[in-house]
Image (cartoon, rainbow, N blue to C red):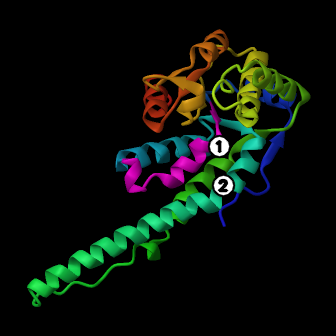
Amino acid sequence: MPTINSPQIISKNTAVQFLDANVKPVMFWDTCSLLDIIRLPIPERRQSLHRLEKVMAIRQKIVSEDIISIASLLTVKEFNDHIINTRGEVIRSAQRITNDFNNFLRFVQKVNPAITHPSVNLNSFYLEDLLGDIVQDIAFFTKFIDRDDSFLRSAEHRVIMKIPPAKKKGEFKDCYIWSTCLEVRQSSVKAGVPFGFFSSNVKDYSELPKINFDPQIAVEATAANIEYYPNIDIAFGRLKASGVL
């Protein structure tokens, strides 16, 4: 099971010191952005192979330590809580495609028995695990920021006051992750270094057309020089524009 085990855990102060000592582009991951890597081949999501190529390019830059990868420690728990269901989504999709293909093939062979083609079993490729390996590579080189009372206070305030990302659903975990990202960035003296927050949770973090931060979050993000990556295309495009890729 591709859970995240033995993560690199650092304190808020250590994270800030690390960012200040290493002047490199930073990606801060939300849980859904990691899980979505495994969901890429699900047909209903209409993802192209180019997006996988972009994920692999970003993975390589993280592994080579040209990009600093960080996240909240809460992301580990969320990821591990959801990985079974996420893998199941991919497995069920592969089974549906397998069934459809083999059924279509039976029609072909019934019409023309001379046509021979073996049936397929897409689940035999274990694509969910291959994609999970990409996530594991990213997680291995990610520094996960430990619990801090200041993150808790900030998240509680956002939930009580219904400040995004708590505006719609009042989700504490989203607020905690954003508070972690924001406080670490605000505390760093290297404010000019590219810093992206990667979350596909556009319902809570974004506004239409779902490529920019919610206006209230945008005020904080702009002041702290945090870019929003709502999907892999935008993440790749902005990192490429800045010369990272």
Q: Which residue is mark 1?
A: 31
**How far across and down, in percent of the image, does residue 230 sit?**
51, 31
Res. 122 mark: none
Give percent across and percent down for residue 76.
Answer: 74, 48
**Per the image, is 38 magenta?**
yes
Which quadrant would the N terminus be assigned to in this image? Answer: bottom right
The correct choice, above or below, for 145 with respect to 227 in the image is below
Q: Which residue is mark 2?
A: 82
Tell me the residue at 52%/49% (across/down). 37
Q: Position of residue 200 (x, y in %)?
A: 54, 36
Q: Which residue is rendered at x = 47% and y = 38% of the image?
A: 232
Could you tell me the amino acid type at mark 2? Answer: His
**Residue 127 visible at all:** no
Q: Which residues are magenta?
A: 27-47
Q: Earlier in the sequence, mark 1 or mark 2?
A: 1
Residue type pointed to by label 1? Thr
Residue for point 44% across, 42% down: 54
Left or right of 97? Residue 239 is right
Horizontal side of residue 151 vs 104, given as left or right: right
- Of badges 1 and 2, nearer the viewer stands 2
Q: Is residue 122 left or right of residue 201?
A: left
Distance, label 1 to label 2, CA atoms, is 9 Å
Query: Mark 1 and 2 residues: CB-CB less than 8 Å, in contact?
Result: yes
Q: Which element is circle 2 on?
A: helix
Residue at the bottom extreme, as displayed: 113
Residue 126, magenta (yes or no):
no
Q: Residues within 10 Å of mark 2 (few under 14, many from 20)?
A: some
Look at the picture and state if 224 lies above or below 137.
above
